[in-house]
């Protein structure tokens, strides 16, 4: 018999961020987004910077995550993320200011600046803004 729900755990090095029963999970895998429903085949995947989305009934919830791994089993998804944030923990004006600051550094980039690091930082900032705006019911179009 196929399971009808998933047990979702999201853990960072500092704390357990989430431990809930959900209906669906969408993960930012290193090779693209991955949708998981109850009964999914087992797999282990590395994670990229992005939005982790989970659904309980008709309600969608979002977390900003960066790097780590996820183990998917038919009845469970365990996310071990280097960084994970709830929307209510994101200071949206600060995240937008950080995004602007990073974009300016990229525009002025010189040979000694680590462009890959700046690009990853920009991606994290954009993800944080998307998660905060989605939780507020706003749009998610963030140019980067």
Image (cartoon, grey):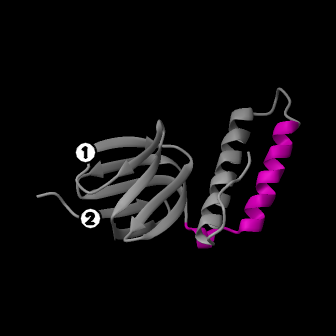
41 w.r.t. 53: above or below: above
Residue 12 appears anywhere in the view: no
Q: Is residue 134 above or below residue 66?
A: below
Query: Is 96 left or right of 75, judged from the image as shown?
Result: right
Q: Quadrant of the N terminus?
A: bottom left
Disc 1 marks which residue?
42
Q: Position of residue 72 (x, y in %)?
A: 31, 50
Q: Residue at x 52, y 63 (%)?
A: 62
List x then y, in percent, for residue 101. 83, 51
Q: Main secondary structure of the magenta part?
A: helix
Give me the residue at 82% from left, 29% from top. 112
Would residue 131 be found to the left or right of residue 45 on screen? right
Residue 79 in the figure: left or right of residue 102: left
Q: Is residue 57 magenta?
A: no
> Which residues are drawn in magenta?
86-107
Q: Nearer the viewer, residue 43 or 144?
A: 144
Task: State which mark lies toward you, 2 or 1.
Answer: 2
**Horizontal placement of 43 versus 107: left or right?**
left
What residue sits 81% from the left and 59% below the top?
A: 97
Looking at the image, how many numbered discs can be counted on the residues?
A: 2
Query: Which quadrant is the C terminus positioned in?
Result: top right
Q: Position of residue 115 (x, y in %)?
A: 74, 33
Can residue 88 be found in the magenta stretch?
Answer: yes
For residue 4, say whether it is visible: yes
Residue that badge 2 annotates = 5
Q: Residue furthest left?
A: 1
In which image quadrant can residue 85 be found?
Answer: bottom right
Secondary structure, mark 2, is loop
Distance between mark 2 and mark 1 Cα atoms: 15 Å
- Residue 73 numbered tag: none
């Amino acid at each position: 018999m196929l399971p009808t729900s998933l047990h979702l755990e999201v853990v960072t090095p500092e704390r357990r961020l989430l431990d809930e029963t959900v209906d669906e999970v969408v993960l930012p895998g290193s090779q693209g987004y991955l949708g998981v429903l109850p009964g999914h085949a087992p797999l282990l995947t590395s994670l990229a910077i992005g939005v982790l989305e989970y659904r309980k009934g008709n309600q969608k919830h979002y977390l900003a995550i960066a790097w780590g791994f996820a183990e998917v089993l038919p009845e469970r998804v365990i996310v071990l993320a280097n960084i994970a944030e709830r929307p209510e923990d994101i200071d949206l004006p600060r995240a937008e200011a950080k995004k602007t600051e990073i974009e300016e550094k990229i525009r002025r980039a010189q040979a000694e600046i680590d462009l890959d690091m700046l690009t990853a930082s920009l991606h994290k900032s954009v993800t944080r803004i998307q998660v905060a705006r989605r939780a507020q019911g706003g749009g998610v179009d963030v140019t980067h």
